[in-house]
Image (cartoon, grey):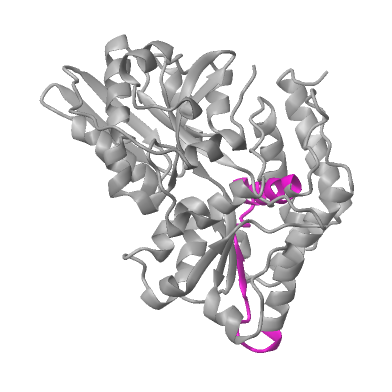
Amino acid sequence: MNYTLKATVAAAALIASGGGALADCGIETGRVDILGNDFAALRAVTEWAGQCASDTVTVTSNHTEEHKNIQVPALSIDPATYTVAIVATNSVVPLLNADLIRPLDDLVAEHGQQLQESQLIRVDGRIMAIAFMANAQHLYYRESILAENGIEVPTTYEEMLAAAAALREAGVLENPIASNMAPGWNIAAEFVNMYLGTGNDLFVPGTAELNIDNEESLLVLETLREMVSFMDGDWATFDSNTTAPIWEAGENAIAIGWGSRAGEIIGPDASDPDVAADTRFSHALFVGGNTIPGAALWWDGFTIARNISDEDAEASFIAMMNGISPEMMAENAESAVWLIDGYEPTPAAVGVVSNLQNGARPYPMLPFMGLLHTALGDNLAEYLQGSESAEQALADVSAAYRTAATEAGFLN
């Protein structure tokens, strides 16, 4: 399979202009059941899709962080539990590998006039997903805290660690840094982010062979361990839902966070208006003398289940067109970096846009990438906790990946 979405394509979408309006949903009958992750931008999309509900059309949505674990079994039965799976760069791969989502070419031709070419995710020439927002992790910082202590805004991980040391030494903050370091998916994402920033590839090009037994991996691990030394002792529980309230409570001055969360952090509903007003964003940090942001570029989009009727598939596609309409975007401009026609970047989009402008690399959309992500998530915590060496951690990752990739037929 040839999975493609280039950073340059997403960047082009950010500067597009214009847009049209949907007259109405135009669905006569059908069911629309949507599964997706749980954050503001996706809730906005499904709320607008829900406007298509009527006496003859049902629309439901399930937002949960467990969506990646639910989607394959839920779409494997016939009829599928969900007609729509909202996915990201990585979570679409298991659905593709199991042949659980349908090509969208006919639906795009009939109902997708509002879509831009850059939103069409093609696999082996067929449209398999519709992208509607870009996402990436980047720097959050408290402008006043850095300025009052004579600290420049960090542009590298090395500068961030130096800033954290200065703030701790001055007694300003004991734990100046926050980042999503929970073992599992989050810590694996942090490794991938920074590794991509080194400029190296995770796999030997054109193969499923790993390419992480090198100095770049050691640098990434050492940097991650230094970061946790400036974080709260509960760092192993940190994901986006735990770091956000800590940030809003004013307990940190520097953080690595998702662009999709930035709008909530500085928005009118933020728990502390002073912290919100003082929060600024910048591109993901560079590492090791490189000038590539240490953050993978992601897209979020939707797919339509294969094991449903054509009537439900059409109803679901039309409802999602309403969900990602320019009108929805206008009402929720701060919630995401939208790939929808007419998008104008907002203050909350500064970090993701800066990542794009500085050449952030896409998350590898490869059939075996999920196996590496799992192996990383399962085998880095002991190193960060100081109970094993970096070399042993990498050896454990490699062994776990090789076993999984061999069982899956990617390696001999």
Is residue 291 visible to us here? Answer: yes
Is residue 385 visible to us here? Answer: no
Q: Residue at x 77, y 22 (%)?
A: 406
Above or below: residue 168 compared with residue 86: below
- Give the x, y percent position of residue 161: 73, 71
Quadrant the C terminus occupies: top right
Q: Residue furthest left?
A: 55
- Give the x, y percent position of residue 93: 58, 26
Question: In this picture, which residue range is highlighted in magenta?
Answer: 168-196
- Residue 373 as seen in the image, left or right of residue 76: right
- Residue 159 as seen in the image, left or right of residue 260: right
- Give the x, y percent position of residue 135: 52, 45
186 inside magenta stretch: yes
- Give the x, y percent position of residue 140: 55, 64
- Front one among 155 and 256: 155
- Residue 274 as seen in the image, left or right of residue 252: left
Q: Residue at x 19, y 20 (%)?
A: 27
Counting every numbered tag in the picture gives: 0
Residue 113 picture quarter: top left
- Front one among 319 and 156: 156
Q: Residue at x 55, y 58 (%)?
A: 257
Residue 214 picture quarter: top right
Above or below: residue 331 compared with residue 302: below
